[in-house]
Image (cartoon, grey):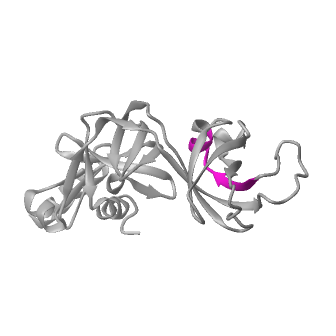
Amino acid sequence: MKYVFLFLAFIATHVFGERELDGVTFKEGSGIQMGIKTKESIGLKTVEVEDRATRRDIRFTAQVYREAHEVSQNQGEPSGFAYASAWVDGSTAAQLTNGTTLLINGANKATGVVMRTDRTMVESGGPMLIQIHDNEQVWKIGTFAYAESVSDESSTATMIPISAVLETAYGPFAFVANGAYFTRTEISLGARIGHHLEITAGLYSGDVAVAQPGETLYRTELRATKDGG
């Protein structure tokens, strides 16, 4: 009887792609299945993906490279302003056009504008230059400027809590409820807004994703697919 059980286990693993690890079943193509007690023991929590109305406020950090009192060496950068540069990602670059008004915090509160953004940055990110109003000349070279763009416009975006996103060497994923299973699903991310991330591909409003512990499910899947490696 023991050999029959082992044979059936072998068949389940290699024909149906199923394997059981510590009370958790992994099925190739479907994902991870577990009982109620296992869910409770690992503290499994889920969250619903939802479309949310949100303002697209964007924040980034720049550093001053020219002070307001310095004589201009560039016709595009007149004296009387401080100038700072920042390295921003593609998502930020796509949303901040030249002339966008910024609120600046750091050495003082100020306003500023986006001076130059190379549109080729949209894919990979790159440098952005900003101009800071500095009548009091408080912004010194090397000072950090914490910039924020504020929009009165709102839009709808598909959002998920940051805790539900699993960052891996192969890109971002989320474990999504798929019947009795949780399936690791590749996703694409947009802007970060508060404690949520925008989902641009891979999930839809109404999907149910694992909020925690995604790392535990991922390690379990790796054990099942790599024979414990």
Whole-percent x and y of residue 228? 36, 69
Q: Quadrant of residue 119?
A: top right
Res 97 seen here = yes
Q: Relative to the observer, which residue lies in front, 115 or 26?
A: 115
Q: Where is residue 92, by image quadrant?
A: top right
User: In percent of the image, x 27 and y 62: which residue is there?
Assistant: 213
Is-magenta flag for residue 174?
Answer: no
Camera-nearest residue between 192 and 3: 192
For the image, the number of numbered tags is: 0
Q: At which x and y percent is residue 59?
A: 52, 51
State the residue in front, 205 or 105: 105
Place of residue 179 in the rendered image (x, y in percent of width and height, measured from the top left): 18, 40
**Residue at 66% from the left image edge and 45% from the top image edge:** 124
- Tell me if I can see residue 127 in this picture: no
Q: Main secondary structure of the magenta part?
A: strand
- When asked about the image quadrant of residue 187, the answer is top left
What residue is drawn where x is 67% and y is 54%? 87
The residue positioned 45% from the left and 39% from the top of the image is: 56
Q: Quadrant of the N terminus?
A: bottom left
| Left or right: 83 in relation to 108 | right
**Residue 139 in the image, given as x and y percentages of width and height:** 68, 63
Question: In the rendered view of the protein, which quadrant contains the C terminus?
Answer: bottom left
Which contiguous range is marked in magenta? 81-93
Which one is nearer the viewer's eye here, 94 or 2?
94
